[in-house]
Image (tube, rainbow, N blue to C red):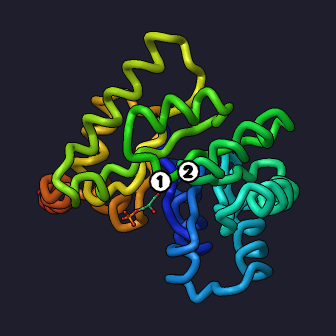
Amino acid sequence: MRIFLDTANVEEVHLGVQLGVVSGVTTNPSLAAKEGIGRLERYKSTVVEICRLVQGPVSAEVLSADVAGMLLEGREIARWAPNAVVKLPSTPAGFQAMSVLSKESISINQTLCFSVNQALLGAQAGASYVSPFVGRLDDEGHDGMQVVEDIVHIFRTYGIPTQVLAASIRHPLHCVAAAKAGAHIATLPYKVLLQMMHHPLTDVGVARFAQDWQRGEKG
Ligand code: G3P
């Protein structure tokens, strides 16, 4: 399972890439707003900068709700960088835009996916990635990770090449569950990436090795 960062914060991407564990990025309008990005030009320059930092796919979301607007924006985003991926919602307009843009060889991340049925339709429409929102499903009392597992299973059964990108990941156990479910990618907030790395026994072990070595040097 590949690890992506779910952020519009360039510094976080820089740090994640430096660690050598992050191979892609997903953004959305809420994440952009969190960084004080409220205009398309700033969103574009931020995404372009992120595309420069990370070699893998970087998803940027369209803001239009209608097909014509999605097509215009999608084609524009696809021109921002060779690794830019167009994020389109799981709505009727979104599926229609996916069908058109995928035929133009534009890479698509089907976002706001909350069901197996939506994922099946996105795959038919040519999405390269489908993003089931695990945390938001859990928030509503559904089992978000079961949706991920079901999509992976069905795609595998039919040899569907669309990659399953577990999104709306809220804590480290979600990462473990996404990997067990067979997700191709998990996209994480930077905080969860740090939590994944940390284990108190590692800290204790590092300190103890250093102490023991010092004792040995004196002996
Ligand atoms: O990748 C989708 C993600 O940004 C949504 O996360 O925590 O807002 O549900 P969240």
Side (left or right) of 79 relative to 9: right
Earlier-in-chain disc, 2 versus 1: 2
Quadrant location of residue 168? bottom left
Give, as a three-letter code, the residue at label 2.
Answer: Thr
Q: Position of residue 181 (x, y in %)?
A: 31, 29
Q: Which residue is depicted at the point 56% across and 66% down?
A: 28
- Residue drawn at (27%, 40%) of the image: 145
Q: Which residue is mark 2?
A: 91
* Residues at marks 2 and 1 touching, judged by CB atoms closer than 8 Å: yes
- Is 176 rendered above or below residue 139? above
Q: Which mark is residue 112?
A: 1
Q: Is residue 50 above or below residue 123?
A: below
Give the crowd class for mark 2: few <14, some 14-19, many >=20 residues within 10 Å: some
Return the x and y of residue 65 as percentages of the image width and height.
65, 64
**Quadrant housing residue 160:** top right
Q: Residue at x 84, y 60 (%)?
A: 72
Report the quarter where the C terminus lies: bottom left
How far is disc 2 from disc 1 in space, using C-alphas? 9 Å
* Quadrant assignment, res 79: bottom right
Name the residue at 78% across, 75% down.
45
Please tell me whether mark 1 sits on a helix, a strand or a loop.
Answer: strand
Amino acid tagged 1: Leu
Residue 190 seen in render: yes
Pinpoint residue 11: horizontal percent, then vertical percent. Answer: 58, 75
Q: Position of residue 103 (x, y in %)?
A: 82, 33
Looking at the rendered structure, the secondary structure element under dot 2 is: loop
Q: In screen coordinates, is 8 left or right of 210? A: right
Q: Which mark is residue 31?
A: none
Residue 206 in view of the camera: no
